[in-house]
Each structure stands twice: as C-alpha cells, then as structure tokens.
Amino acid sequence: MRENDCLQLMHLVAMAPTRNSDESDASMRERLVNSLSQSFPGSALSKALSCMSAEDSECDDDMKDPLSSSCFAELRLDKVDIEDDDELTSLSWLQDNDLLKNIKPSDVDDDDDSQKENDNNHRDGNHFNPTHPPHVPYNPQKHIHSKPPYSFSCLIFMAVEDSPHKKLPVKDIYSWILNHFPYFQNAPTGWKNSVRHNLSLNKCFKKVDKDRGQSIGKGSLWCIDPDYRPNLLQALRKTPYHPYHQLQMLANPQPTQQYHYVPNGMRPMPLTPRFGPNTISPHLFPFLSKRLAQSNSSDNNDIDRDIQDVAHTLVSLKGLGNRGSPARSSDGEDYASNSYRMRLKRKQMQLKTDFVKRRHTEPIVVTEVPSDDHTYSLTNFANIGSPASSIDEEYDFGEEDDNFSEECSDMSDWDSDMDEVDGDIPNKHTKVTPHKNIHNSNMAKITSRKRKEMEEEEQKKIVEGADALLNLAGIMTNSSSLKSNRSHS
DNA sequence: TAACGCATAAACAGGA
DNA sequence: ATCCTGTTTATGCGTT
C-alpha cells in the first residue's frame, strides 16, 4: 500500500509543472528532491521524496509516509548538524534550477552574509536583526539572530494548533515559541509582553474556562476562536517563508509571483515567494495532513474541524484558479485546459454545496485584503456567530461529529472524479488494483472487525498519499481530505 | 496623507 | 513581597 502511495507520489512529482517544458520527469523529480532536502534537511517530506527517488530500501517505512508531519512539524526542525547545515546552503537549489543564475554571487551568498551580519549585530550588544532578508528562506533553527518573519499572531496560532488539545496556557505558548524559534531565547524579554498583548487584544484568541480540578498554575488556557481561524490560516499562508513555499514555487509557478527584472535582459527572478490572495497554498494541506496523521490516536472531531475549516477556506479562495500556469500532467493534459478545469470545478461545486449545507450559519472568513486577516479592529463577521459565553461551546475539543461523514457520503461521484484527475489513485471502495487483490484475499481470512479496521487504516493512507501527490502538483486537495473524512465514517 | 496592522513599551490590577 | 498573568494605553514604524 505504502509503496503504491510512493509510486503515486513519484507520479505526481513527475507531473508537477516544470519551468522548462522539455525537462524530463526524472530531472524534475530530482530537482524537487534536491530542493526539499537542501532547504529543509531532515524534513519528513524531503526524506520521503529522497527515499522514493533513490528507491532506497534502507529508508524507514515511516519515511514513506510523507504526511506524517505537518507544516508545524516542519517548523520543528531538528537541530541540524552545523557542518551539514553549512553544506546545504538554502539557496543552492535555486542555483541548481537556474533561478538565481543571473544574480551576483554576493547576492546568492546573502544567506551566509546575513548570518554574519546577524552575528556581528549580536556581538555588538543587544542588536538583533529586526528583519529576515526577504530572499533567504527562513530556517528558525539556523537564523537564530533573525527575527522570525511571522507575526506574533501567527506564532501563537502555530503554538496553539500544535498542542494536543488546541489550547495552551500562556506559559506553554512561550515555551513553544522558544523551542521552535531560538531567536527568542536571546531576544529581549519584551516579546513575552507582546505575546500577552496579542492574546488579549487579538480577537483571534480566546480564553478557555479551566477545567475543574485542572492545575495549570496561574492564568487560563488560550485557544483559537474558530470564527477567526480561517483568518489566521490565511495570514500564515501569506507568510513568505513557509517551509513549503519552495515546493510550491517549484511545483506551481505562480503567475502572481512578483518578479524582479534584472537589468541585462536575462530571465526575471522571483522575489519573495509571496502568495497572491487566490493562489493555491500547499502548506495548508500539510497542516491538515497532520491532523489526518494524528487520526490514529485521536477522535475524528478535530479532523472534521480542520477539514471543514481548510476546505472552507480553500473553496472560498477559489483556489482552483491556478490561473495562467500552463502546467501539464504526465499524460499531457493542460492543467489550464477547459476539461481539466471543468472537472475540478465540479469538485469545487460539490464541496461548496456540502459546506453550505453544513455550515450555513457560519460566515466565510476569507479575505483578499491583508488588513482583514488580523483582528485588532473588529470586523463584521465576528459578530455574526453565536456569542457563546464559553469557548468550549463554540469549539468542540473532542466530541464526535457524526453528521459530517453522513453528508459526505452523499458525494457519490468523488471517486470517479478523482480517477479522472489522476487515474492512479485507487478507488477507496470498489476499484481494486492487483496489489489490493492480493491484499483482499488475505483480508478474507481475518475477522470482519479486524478487516474493517485495516481497511480504515488503508483508506487513511490512500488519502494521505493522494493529498501528498496533489499537493506536490499544486492542486487543491480539499477533496481528498474530505474523502478521508468520509472514510472514517 | 490617512488608515491600518503590527510591534514594542509601559502601567496597572489581580492572583498564586 | 515577588512573580506571573491579563488588560489597557500609548507610540512608532511600515504598508496600503
């Protein structure tokens, strides 16, 4: 099964749009693998890609599951060996792909230069580089003297979302930020004040009533206001240094990409890989996939919530609009072709209908204006929802949600649709590959209960694989996420 | 230029 | 008394 996923992933990697139309699948795959491994050494996805690329039998089985970690997990980059880190200059992948071939070496080496500058600033005293160089992929463990390019809102959001119960006391928020962004270990202590200030003032965050008998010390638990969660997701999406941006840039060159035209008439080079408001955001899906990956040990409610929220966001984003990108699938079909877009559009409409049915009382909180992302100032939608006195009333921390799976089961044409888009993705119910035939023959010997468990497990993996594949190709995968949700039912 | 988002600093109150 | 948490106000900077 996992090998099958790997093959699918490789297929999609090969499908991913290339900058050079005549570039081979192999070279494209190699580019992706190099890109990921160089920019984010140790990341689960890059390891998984490396395993598949090299067909390395020594790779752990776990590494073949590229969705075992989320964007947040990626942010939790292990402390990498300094030597290795130096070798893996963050921009080398750009050079490899001719994206920086027109830029002066001094520019290319800005990563190191900025680091040296940061070191100098640090030695000078209390100076910390206030901003991270816009053209250097940010590595929180490496650029420990660069202020993270994330707002405090995003940092808090990530911390809370990365917690098991999506609620944290302020002290743990501090800890999460310190652990993931060593910059703050040496930064002036004012940042804690800023965190508290943000928690208090930012409407995205709400205090949770402490459970009785729960001893967390002083203070309350903080969680994300579900009404504002899409805003935070969008704000995070617009953050230019997300680990998956490089993958995004390779797999889905954006027509909205801002380009800097070099003077000698050479090819333009991308500036900060900033997303436009309607572009596809792959990093949303690793986040979702984390919840999927956690599904083995948690109930489905959180998954439902994330699927809903992310899909809700993406539907609203009209994220199918990979506008103008003449990407082609492996069978030569133009992603921008009418037939392709029509099929995706059908799925989009299906999703839309579903979510309108399910969450018709909840406003769509997706903005195209950055100023609407954050909520120091009140926005109208915030008052539409029910003013529950306790956040627990709005935000279920673990109750089962049965309705959603039932509604999703109505989406009968999903499988066929998926097969149209990518014929290699197996149908979760009826279509059986030869590989699965063998599998099913063995399954027949097992008790029905055990078989059901195994099937559920397998479906999760299928969906995760499909998610990864589509993400790599820059295709919206809320559909596959919803499929996964249905598979839980 | 104004409005806004955001960061930062500071004062203050209340609780552990 | 001290520290932590939470709230509020003020200010400055950058962006739109």
Image (cartoon, coloured by chain):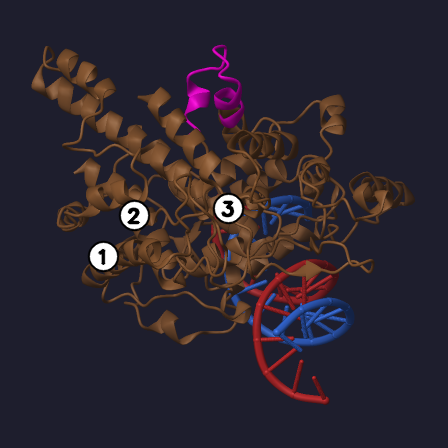
Chain colours: A brown, B red, C blue
The x and y percentages for residue B16 are: 49, 44
Q: Is residue A255 visible in the rendered structure shown here? A: yes
Q: Secondary structure at mark 2?
A: helix
Rendered view: A239 above or below A172: below
Tell which of A280 and A170 is nearer to you. Answer: A280
Residue at mark 2 to residue at mark 1: CA–CA distance: 9 Å
Which label sits on residue A350?
1
Magenta span includes A52: yes
Q: Could you confirm whether marks 2 and 1 are on the same chain?
A: yes
- Which callout, 3 or 1, points to the residue nearer the camera? 1
User: Upstream in the sequence, badge 2 or badge 1?
Assistant: 1
- Chain of residue at mark 1: A
- Chain of residue at mark 3: A
Q: Residue at x 30, y 58 (%)?
A: A342
User: Do the CB atoms of the residues marked 2 and 1 lie less than 8 Å apart?
Assistant: yes
Residue position for label 3: A158
Rendered view: A369 above or below A209: below
The x and y percentages for residue C3 are: 64, 44
The x and y percentages for residue A405 are: 17, 45
Which label sits on residue A479?
2
Q: Which residues are magenta?
A: A49-68
The x and y percentages for residue A278 are: 47, 62
User: Upstream in the sequence, badge 3 or badge 1?
Assistant: 3
Q: Secondary structure at mark 1?
A: helix
Instruction: Quadrant for residue A214, please give it.
Output: top left
- Chain of residue at mark 2: A
